[in-house]
Amino acid sequence: MPRVLLTGFEPFDGAALNPSWEAARLVAADPPRGLEVTSTRLSCVFGRAVDELRAAVRETGPDVVVCLGQATGRPDISVERIAVNIDDARIPDNAGRRPVDRPVVRGGPAAYFATLPVKACVAAVREAGLPASLSHTAGTFVCNHVFYALMHQLATERPTTRGGFVHVPALPEQVLDRAQPSLPATTTAHALRALLTASLRPTDLHTPEGITH
């Protein structure tokens, strides 16, 4: 049975919840048929989160790793395509760290592409009746920090393991204005089950998901 490691983050910036962890633990408790899913909660702290992720990868020996993060303001499940080798924090992390213009891995490549079939993952979420998009930036905060570190670890230690990052919307209880986009954790978990099943496809779809600006 294929093994999946699914990570989410602890709450940050004063929030009580983080939808990435709420969804991750729901999926691990009720995984898609045919998959063994382990969930791990990461600290929202530069450096520490990477140490926790590396340990979890080595302990579980997964076939697929999908890291999740919160993207307040985004209306859909955003499958990230590329991680860049830069930390540039607009706000402090949970330990008060705020790196600026610093590489995630000194001497590492400028960027890594996700090795998930990203377009197939987007299509699978849409087929499940939920909004999804292919994103070309994971930001420069702890989410991108973890995404880049994951891909670097897989490239150097586990080249046959697939990996990637997915941003999820805020929870309804986190938004003050009902006009702001949000998804319940159960809905996000449903989308992620479809995405994880698609992550095992041998090839990606060849469909346009690019941007024009």
Image (cartoon, helix red, strand yellow):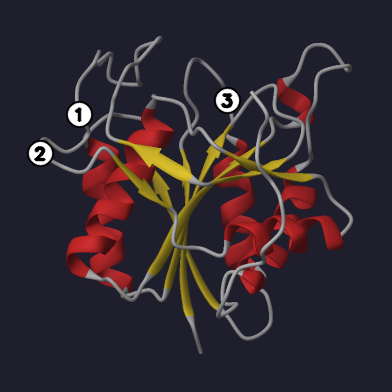
Q: What residue sits right under mark 2 in the picture?
A: 107
- Write down the residue under mark 3: 16
Instruction: Work out whether 49 lies above or below 1.
Output: above
> Which residue carries the number 1 mark?
103
Q: Name the secondary structure under disc 2.
A: loop
Residue shown at 57% from the left, 65% from the top: 28
Residue drawn at (11%, 35%), measured in percent from left and top?
106
Counting other residues with Cα less than 10 Å from the Cα at mark 2, is it few (<14), some (14-19), or many (20 or more)?
Answer: few
Count residues near mark 1 (Cα–Cα under 10 Å), then give few for <14, some for 14-19, many for 20+. Answer: some
Whole-percent x, y for residue 144 in the image: 39, 35
Pointer 1 with pointer 2, Cβ within 8 A: yes
Under mark 3, the amino acid is Ala
Q: Amino acid at mark 2?
A: Gly
Mark 2 to mark 3: distance in Å?
37 Å
33 up-or-down from 112: above or below: below
Question: Is 50 or 13 nearer to us in this picture?
Answer: 50
Amino acid of disc 1: Pro
Q: Which of marks 3 and 1 precedes in the sequence?
A: 3
User: Horizontal and vertical percent for residue 69?
Assistant: 52, 38
Left or right: 48, with 199 as reference point = left
Q: Secondary structure at mark 3?
A: loop
> To which quarter of the image does residue 34 belong?
bottom right
* Pair 1/3: label in front: 1
Q: Name which residue lies at 60% across and 29% down.
A: 71
Nearest to viewer (mark 2 / mark 3): 2
Q: Quadrant of residue 171?
A: top right
Q: CA distance from mark 1 to mark 2?
A: 8 Å
Q: Residue 178: percent from the left, percent from the top?
A: 88, 17
Q: Is the residue 19 above or below the residue 64 in the image?
A: above
